[in-house]
Amino acid sequence: MANIKSAKKRVQVNELARARNNAFKSDLRSTIKAFHAKADEKDVNSAQEFFLSATSKLDKAVNKGLFHKNAANRRKARLQKRLNEISA
């Protein structure tokens, strides 16, 4: 455990940031799971809504530094491919 005051503060700030990041990632995973559930049901309209929500959240995650932009783009491409498969 840290002994220096500034180091103790950093530990506290890092814990808060970790909790915030985990909550954001959890919400993103839930949205992606909902998209896949609607895609399995072939519900194009609902899947489209979840797709837009997921891509928006992925872009926000990149801006927050949670994902590398290429990793987010790869995930979005996979979701788009799945959406195109059920739309066709």
Image (cartoon, rainbow, N blue to C red):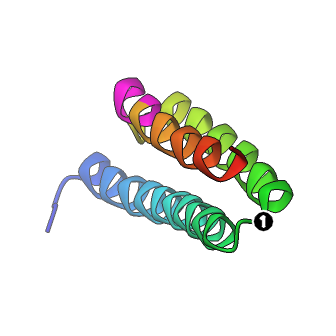
Return the residue at label 1.
43
Which of the 4 quarters of the picture holds residue 32? Answer: bottom right
**Residue closest to the eye, 22 or 85:** 85
Residue lying furthest right in this view? 45
Is residue 1 or residue 76 the one in the foreground? Answer: 76
SS assignment at label 1: loop
Of helix, strand and loop, which mostly describes the magenta segment?
Answer: helix
**Which span of residues is magenta-colored?**
68-73
Residue ID at (65%, 53%): 86
Q: Mark 1 packing: few (<14 Cα in 10 Å), some, or many (20+)?
A: some
Residue 3 found in image quarter? bottom left
Q: Position of residue 40 (x, y in %)?
A: 60, 71
Up-down relation of residue 36 to residue 69 (above or below): below
Q: Position of residue 34 (x, y in %)?
A: 65, 70
Residue at 49% over, 32% down: 62
Query: Magenta stretch: residue 42 in it?
Result: no
11 vs 49, left or right, is: left
Residue 69: image x %, image y %?
A: 41, 25
Q: Amino acid at mark 1?
A: Asp
In which quadrant is the C terminus drawn? top right
Report x, y in % for residue 81. 52, 40
Identify which residue is drawn at 20% across, 53% down.
4
